[in-house]
Image (spheres, rainbow, N blue to C red):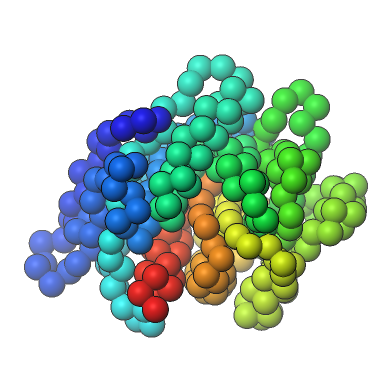
């Protein structure tokens, strides 16, 4: 399989109840050749060499898969999730972050070209650039669920704090950060986002009205043909997601985050989703991994409902 390792994970649901259909019973090993036969495909990206703070996100893909295998496949509004393939894991080359971004971008382009809906399991936020860049040949916008804007200047090379500046410099048409926290970013970076026509929806606004928050993010995407949705686990409150590089209070609840993701993922322009900055070694009682896996499940449920409509 070009650019991807053969899936090593055994997708088996751990429940002994024959009535318990879990994602472990639904997800199948897939290849790029048959990726378009699935409603969505999973791609692991185990890299955290660009993290500014605490590392551990390279263990995210494996942990999210393990947790997701035991999650039930039924969503009350959309019904059961079906037709999910696992393309395996992107081999991470030796070298600096720029070299890693280049290699991952090549593989991400192959996944997008396969006419599949990719769900990238990170890994750190630097790979957002690699995952989105292949879409820049058309009109595309990104909705980023994140505590931070991640538009730092890559002065000494790219980091987990630079992906959206890299994308905007490369021609990204629209950007919205949803769940941004007060006192977690610099004025200059906020000004930069505003200067580039981007939108910022704070965590308080999401908490007060997630529907209005989703509408504000999608309003910022008016005029683009494709959307990409990114979930940085640090958008969640530190009590709900301690296993991230930079946990802080004042973030989203898991319930609010899941609802927001379903509303965004239901947009028929969405061309991909990622979950990044889930760091199992930094977690407590598996809270962050559980949230990340269920975020994937909620997006898949919205995707299944959209595909089957």
Q: Residue at x 78, y 63 (%)?
A: 199
Q: Quadrant of the N terminus?
A: top left
Relative vertical location of residue 145 with respect to residue 21 in this rendering, above or below:
above
Q: Quadrant of the C terminus?
A: bottom left
The answer, for residue 68, to whether it is visible in the render is: no
Q: Position of residue 132 (x, y in %)?
A: 59, 46
Examine the image and state in which quarter residue 147 appears. Answer: bottom right
Q: Position of residue 258 (x, y in %)?
A: 50, 69
Looking at the image, which residue sits at the far top?
95
Q: Position of residue 51 (x, y in %)?
A: 62, 34
Q: Position of residue 142 (x, y in %)?
A: 65, 56
Of the pair 128 and 236, the residue shown nearer to us: 128
Relative vertical location of residue 10 with respect to residue 52 in this rendering, above or below:
below
Relative vertical location of residue 68 with respect to residue 277 in this rendering, above or below:
below
Examine the image and state in which quarter residue 175 appears. Answer: bottom right
The answer, for residue 126, to whether it is visible in the render is: yes
Q: Residue at x 31, y 68 (%)?
A: 81
Q: In this image, 126 relative to 187: left or right?
A: left
């Amino acid at each position: 399989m070009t650019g991807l390792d053969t899936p090593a994970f055994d997708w088996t649901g751990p429940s002994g109840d024959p009535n318990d259909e879990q994602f472990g019973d639904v997800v199948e090993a897939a290849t790029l050749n048959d990726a378009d036969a699935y409603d969505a495909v999973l791609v692991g990206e185990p890299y955290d060499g660009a993290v500014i703070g605490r590392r551990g996100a390279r263990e995210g893909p494996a942990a999210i898969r393990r947790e997701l295998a035991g999650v039930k496949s039924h969503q009350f509004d959309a019904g059961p999730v079906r037709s999910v393939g696992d393309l395996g894991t992107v081999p991470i080359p030796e070298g600096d972050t720029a070299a890693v971004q280049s290699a991952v971008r090549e593989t991400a382009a192959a996944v997008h070209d396969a006419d599949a809906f990719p769900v990238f399991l990170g890994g750190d936020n630097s790979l957002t650039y690699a995952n989105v860049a292949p879409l820049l040949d058309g009109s595309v916008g990104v909705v980023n669920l994140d505590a931070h804007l991640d538009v730092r200047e890559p002065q000494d090379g790219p980091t987990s704090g630079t992906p959206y500046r890299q994308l905007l410099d490369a021609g990204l048409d629209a950007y919205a950060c949803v769940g941004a926290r007060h006192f977690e970013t610099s004025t200059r970076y906020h000004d930069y986002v505003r200067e580039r026509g981007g939108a910022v929806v704070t965590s308080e606004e999401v908490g007060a009205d997630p529907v209005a928050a989703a509408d504000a993010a999608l309003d910022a995407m008016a005029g683009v043909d494709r959307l990409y949705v990114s979930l940085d686990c640090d958008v969640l409150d530190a009590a709900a997601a301690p296993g991230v590089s930079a946990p802080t209070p004042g973030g989203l609840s898991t319930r609010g985050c899941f609802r927001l993701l379903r509303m965004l993922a239901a947009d028929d322009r969405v061309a991909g989703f990622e979950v990044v900055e889930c760091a199992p070694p930094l977690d407590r009682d598996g809270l962050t991994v559980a949230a990340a896996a269920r975020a994937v499940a909620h997006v898949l449920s919205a995707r299944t409902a959209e595909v089957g409509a």
